[in-house]
Image (cartoon, rainbow, N blue to C red):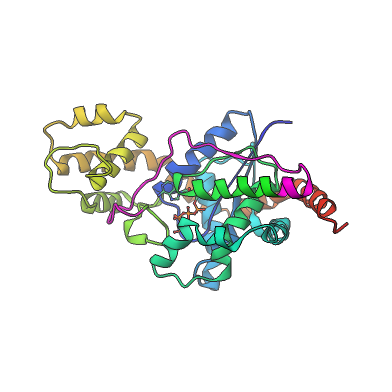
C-alpha cells in the first residue's frame, strides 16, 4: 500500500491564489507523482463553523469542486469527495473530543484570529482542529499538504494521534506536513494579514478576469520605498507581490529583484498582473467548461466518496473496538 495523503478545502467562498499556492499546487504535484494514495475533500462541515447563507452553500460546494478540478486535481488519480458524505469524519471528531483539553483548543491561533476579525465564535469554530484531526487520521494519512497557516492544526492532529495511541494502543500514525516552501500569501489590501476567503477585499481569486486582476494588483498595498525589494518584516506589501511573482513565474526572488532594478512599482505591478493573467487562463478555461457540466462534477464527488468510505468505516470500527464501544 502506498503512503496516504489527505487534505481539504473549505467551501467558504471562491478559491484565491493563497489557497492555490499554499495547498492546491502541492496537492496536484503529489497526485501526479503516483507515489501516494491521495484523498482530497471539500470541507463542508468545516465551512459551517463560519457565518453562512444556507441558500448559497450548495452552490459554494459545487463551485469549489469545479475550482479544484480546474486547478488540476484529477479524479482518476485522487479520491475527491465531500466531507459530510462520509459521516465517520463527524463520528471520529466526537470520540477525539473526549481526549482533547479545552485549554489546548483555546490556544489555537486561527480561532483567536477569527474572533479578532469579528466572528462570533460557535462551538464548531472552537472544535475545528478536532474535526481536522479526524479528517486526517481517519485515512491514516502520512502527509498533509497545507499552507503555513495550518501548521498549528497539523501539530494538533499529531498530538491527538499520540494521545489516542498512548491511551488506547497504537492505532494512528503521526502525520507530517508537506510544507516544502511553507507558503503564506498575504492579503493584497492589508499585507499584515493572510489572504483569506473571509477577507474578500484582499483576495485575488482564481476566477478573476484580466481586468479585475490588473485593478487588484495595481491597487495592492506597497510602501513608500522606490525600489522593488524583498523583506517581509519591514516591507510586507511589496515582498508579498514579489513572492507571488516568484511562485507564478518560477523565477527566484533575487532574480526578480535584479530583473526589476531601477523599475518603479507601477511597472513591476503591470508585469505581475500579466503573469497572473497568463497562468490563470488555462485554469479559467477549464473552469468554464466544468461549470456547464454539473452532473459530471457531482458524479466525480460521488465516486470519490465511494472510494473513501470503506477506509473511513474500517478506521472507525477499529477505534470503536479500541475504546470499548464494541
Ligand atoms: N493566504 C494563504 N497562504 C497560503 N496558504 C493558504 N491557505 C489558505 N490561505 C492561505 C491554504 O489553503 C488551504 C485550504 O484552506 P481552507 O479553504 O481549508 O481554509 P483556510 O486556510 O481557512 O482558508 P481561507 O482562505 O483563510 O478561508 P476562510 O477565510 O474561510 O477561513 C489550506 O491548506 C490553507 O493552509
- Seen in the image, is 29 located left or right of residue 255? right
Range covered by the magenta-colored residues: 164-193
Residue 254 part of the magenta-drawn span: no
Task: Pinpoint residue 264: horizontal percent, then vertical percent.
Answer: 13, 40
The residue nearer to you, when weighing 198 against 92, is 92
The residue nearer to you, when weighing 46 against 175, is 175
- Seen in the image, is 111 located left or right of residue 170? left
Q: Is residue 108 visible?
A: yes
Task: Pinpoint residue 142: horizontal percent, then vertical percent.
Answer: 64, 37
The residue nearer to you, when weighing 276 against 135, is 135
Residue sitting at 26 percent across and 41 percent down?
239
Outermost residue toward the right?
326
Q: Is residue 40 visible?
A: no
Principal secondary structure, stretch drawn in magenta: loop
Residue 37 vertical position relative to residue 153 in the rendered view, above or below: above
The part of the image, by quadrant, that contains residue 247 is top left
| Quadrant position of the C terminus in the picture | bottom right
Numbered circles on residues, count: 0
The residue nearer to you, when weighing 189 against 271, is 189
Residue 206 vertical position relative to residue 33 in the rendered view, above or below: below
| Quadrant position of the N terminus in the picture | top right
Residue 181 part of the magenta-drawn span: yes
Task: Pinpoint residue 119: horizontal percent, then vertical percent.
Answer: 44, 70
- Seen in the image, is 209 located left or right of residue 295? left
Residue 252 vertical position relative to residue 233 in the rendered view, above or below: above
Residue sitting at 35 percent across and 30 percent down?
250
Residue sitting at 22 percent across and 52 percent down?
221
Task: Pinpoint residue 289: horizontal percent, then vertical percent.
Answer: 50, 48
Amino acid at each position: 500500500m502506498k503512503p496516504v495523503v489527505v487534505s481539504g478545502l473549505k467551501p467558504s467562498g471562491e478559491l484565491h491564489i493563497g489557497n492555490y499556492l499554499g495547498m492546491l499546487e502541492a496537492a496536484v504535484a503529489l497526485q501526479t507523482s503516483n507515489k501516494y494514495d491521495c484523498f482530497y475533500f471539500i470541507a463542508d462541515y468545516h465551512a459551517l463553523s463560519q457565518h453562512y447563507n444556507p441558500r448559497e452553500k450548495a452552490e459554494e460546494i459545487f463551485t469549489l469542486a469545479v475550482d479544484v478540478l480546474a486547478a488540476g486535481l484529477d479524479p482518476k488519480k485522487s479520491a475527491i469527495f465531500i466531507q459530510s458524505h462520509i459521516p465517520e469524519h463527524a463520528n471520529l471528531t466526537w470520540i477525539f473530543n473526549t481526549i482533547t483539553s479545552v485549554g489546548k483548543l483555546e490556544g489555537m491561533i486561527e480561532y483567536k484570529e477569527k474572533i479578532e476579525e469579528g466572528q462570533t465564535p460557535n462551538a464548531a469554530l472552537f472544535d475545528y482542529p478536532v474535526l481536522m484531526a479526524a479528517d486526517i487520521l481517519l485515512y491514516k494519512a502520512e502527509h498533509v499538504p497545507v499552507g503555513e497557516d495550518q501548521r498549528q492544526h497539523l501539530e494538533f492532529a499529531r498530538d491527538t494521534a499520540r494521545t489516542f495511541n498512548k491511551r488506547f494502543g497504537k492505532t494512528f500514525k503521526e502525520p507530517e506536513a508537506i510544507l516544502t516552501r511553507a507558503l503564506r500569501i498575504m492579503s493584497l489590501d492589508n499585507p499584515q494579514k493572510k489572504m483569506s476567503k473571509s477577507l474578500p477585499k484582499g483576495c485575488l481569486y482564481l476566477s478573476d478576469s484580466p481586468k479585475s486582476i490588473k485593478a487588484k494588483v495595481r491597487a495592492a498595498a506597497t510602501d513608500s520605498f522606490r525600489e522593488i525589494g524583498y523583506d517581509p518584516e519591514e516591507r510586507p506589501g511589496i515582498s508579498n507581490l514579489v513572492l507571488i511573482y516568484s511562485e507564478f513565474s518560477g523565477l527566484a526572488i533575487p532574480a526578480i529583484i535584479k530583473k526589476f532594478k531601477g523599475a518603479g512599482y507601477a511597472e513591476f505591478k503591470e508585469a505581475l498582473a500579466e503573469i497572473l493573467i497568463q497562468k490563470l487562463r488555462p485554469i479559467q478555461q477549464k473552469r468554464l467548461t466544468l461549470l456547464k457540466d454539473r452532473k459530471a462534477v457531482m458524479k466525480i464527488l460521488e465516486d470519490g466518496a465511494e472510494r473513501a468510505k470503506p477506509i473511513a468505516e474500517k478506521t472507525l470500527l477499529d477505534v470503536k473496538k479500541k475504546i470499548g464501544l464494541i
